Image (cartoon, rainbow, N blue to C red):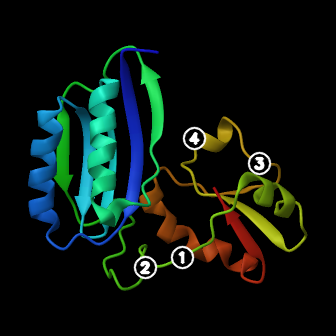
Amino acid sequence: MKAYQTLLYYCYSHIQDAEQYNADHLKFCKSLDLTGRIIIAYEGINGTVSGTPEACQAYMDYIYADGRFNATEFKIDEVDKPSFIKIHCRYKSEIVYSGLKDPSYINPTEETGKHLEPKEFAEMKDHNDVVILDVRSNYDPSMGKFKNAVTLDIENFRDFPEMINELAQYKDKKILTY
């Protein structure tokens, strides 16, 4: 076991007073000596934090103790040293910037798609009525992608809304994203 961990996570869940929650959250992270970057918005939380295994466990317990974030899934990496120098906790309008100004256009706290288990994805990916859409930045597919995956020339997810019209040709197909 390595001396530190890095946690990667996000959770869409409405936060009534997100600005106050942000201030309280930062104070809690500092009490654990965590480092990292966290974004808090009315729609939820998105972050990467790093610290000792004990501090990371205390942080995950804190997140799960708040019923709004029960659906949070943490990706945990063991690392030799903290992944960041200091902690930043910022209040923003969105936890994953899309640039869509009207929050009623997309409500990520409602079911917007169905999560597939790997076996389900594998069974569906080669069907004729299915398109695999790679929504990662344009660098990532150069490292690897699914066979026949449709890629978009985007540098960041915030560019995705501008590319929607390019997907109109697939409107009658099931779309698998990753």
Q: Residue at 46% across / 61% down in the picture?
A: 159
Numbered badge on residue 112: 1
**Circle 1 — which element?**
loop
Vertical order, 172 against 11 (above or below): below
Q: Earlier in the sequence, mark 1 or mark 4?
A: 1
Q: Position of residue 21 (x, y in %)?
A: 14, 60
* SS of the residue under disc 2: loop
In the rendered image, which quarter is residue 55 located in? Answer: top left
* Viewer-closest of 69 and 87: 69
Mark 2 or 1 closer to N-term?
A: 2
Residue nearest the observer in this picture, 31 or 139: 31
Task: Check disc 1 and give the amino acid type.
Answer: Thr
Amino acid type indicated by mark 3: Phe
**Label 2 near label 4: C-beta < 8 Å?**
no
The answer to which image quadrant residue 36 occupies is: top left
Q: Are marks 3 and 4 in contact (CB under 8 Å)?
A: no
According to the picture, the residue beneath numbered tag 4 turns out to be 139
Residue where numbered disc 3 is placed: 146
Label 1 to label 4, Cα distance in Å?
26 Å
Residue beneath disc 2: 106
- Residue 114, given in percent of the width and then of the height, sits at 63, 71
Q: Is residue 4 left or right of residue 58?
A: right
